[in-house]
Amino acid sequence: MKAPWHFMTGGDWLVVLLLLTSSLGGIVSIAAMSEGSRVLITCGDELCFTAPLDQPRTLAIDGPLGQTKLVIDERGARIVESPCPRKICVSMGVAKHTGDLLACVPNRILVHIDGSSGKEVSYDLLSR
Amino acid sequence: MPWNRPLIIGLLLVVLTLTWWRLQPDGEEVRRSRIMMGTVVEIMAAGQSSKTLEAAVEAAFAEMERLDKLLSRYNTDSEVSRLSQSTTGGEVSLPTVEVLTLGLEISRKSGGAFDMTLGKLKTLWAFDKEAPTLPNAAELSAALSGIGPKALSLEGQQLRKASPQLQLDLGGIAKGYAVDRAIAILKQHGVANAAVNAGGDMYLLGQRHERSWRIGIQHPREEKGVLETVQISNRAVVTSGDYERFFEQDGVRYHHIFNPQTGMPARDCQSVTIITDSVALGDALATAVFVLGPKAGLTLLEQFPQAEGLVIAADGSRHSSPGWTSYQVVP
């Protein structure tokens, strides 16, 4: 008796491939759900900037020591330049999941990832 | 050929077409942020050519920087600082004339609730420093001496100060004016869809993703809460709130929006949001309405048919002008 795949045509294989791709996409989407949706930046004691995590940008944030440079891209948010003496913040790597935190204590800058509610942001910009 | 083969091929074509359509970008979008004017300024511009957009955004930032140098009281070389240091006033540039003309109009119509002569008072409270302080009565009295809308007059490009000690502060209007100018520069570069946001004072040009812009309004008592969402196009949105800069002493909250009559923080509102046709106007009106309180504030707005307002009173009650609902997004 022949195996079932001997009866499959090229179109059937294409359908199988499509289904597998869709399933893989679904799995990736579910995994991505633990990723945060917004970057919150605190300068000193104040929330000084928020931005969606899925929109690439480079931001220079002023602190008492000078400017800390933050990059948001497809990998997440990361500090790439800092005027602080030990550069611990630069070596902290990428923050992208809800609750992840980057901090430059000498320059009093905190970057954390929010989105734990799982709710989609329903606005483009916030007037505050 | 099996009967279902054309069906399968047809379905596959539909799926591929939909996938291709979804993957196509709507056009280019440039989004840049800079810290200037004491806040984060963000410009978003959408169009067909990222090169054109980049040039437009860069020119808009350059214009805002130019105006900041002209109108900031923190820059000792600015025109505003020069006027504050002079005994009688002097000749001012055209942008300063525009800002002062609008500011004096709002000042007059609001009975002095909006005031550009609070430079000494703001220095006294030191909200822009690390440790703001609660002044005593004598200090307040000295800072309020000789101020008010009648202490300034403008004839052509000549500004006259009634008192040599009077110090200008255009903080309640200059940031908005700079946003308006940035939008004008973007338009000159052919940008039709953009947003310029200077710390929450913003103008929304055209559309975003083929719909009106959706703007969340900060809840005054919940740090991450949104009071409501409005949808607008070719309009300015400005919010002033007592939560932006404040300190607490003996259980009392002291914030940075002052009643010019007392020199103390205005007490009748938690936040005011204005939607109108220019950010400078929205900036000045938001301050004036905040100082006047919900009732008198909304009465003031009746003089400006192009403006709508949402006021959250000190007790948390919500008040709005009649046309506000036309902007609301129904949840």
Image: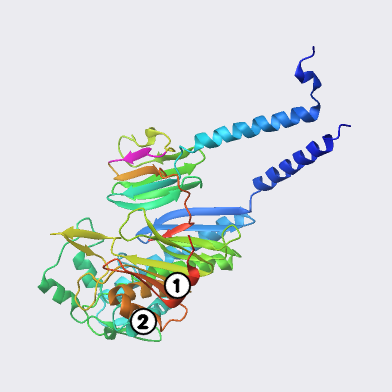
Q: Position of residue B64 (x, y in %)?
A: 44, 64
Would residue B161 be seen by someone viewing this image from the given angle? no
- Disc nearest the viewer among 1 and 2: 1
Residue in view at x 33 percent, y 44 percent: A110
Q: Secondary structure at mark 2?
A: helix
From which residue to which does the magenta span run?
Answer: A98-105
The amino acid on which the numbered mark 1 sits, given as a three-letter code, is: Trp
Give, as a three-letter code, the residue at label 2. Leu
Q: CA distance from mark 1 to mark 2?
A: 15 Å
- Residue B169 forms part of the magenta stretch: no
Q: Please, which chain is the residue tagged with disc 1 on?
A: B
Sequence-wise first label, 1 or 2: 2
Residue B279 in view: yes
Q: Is residue B139 left or right of residue A87?
A: left
Q: Chain of mark 2?
A: B
Residue B324 badge: 1
Rendered image quadrant of residue B309: bottom left
| Mark 2 lies on residue | B300
Quadrant of the snapshot with the N terminus of chain A: top right
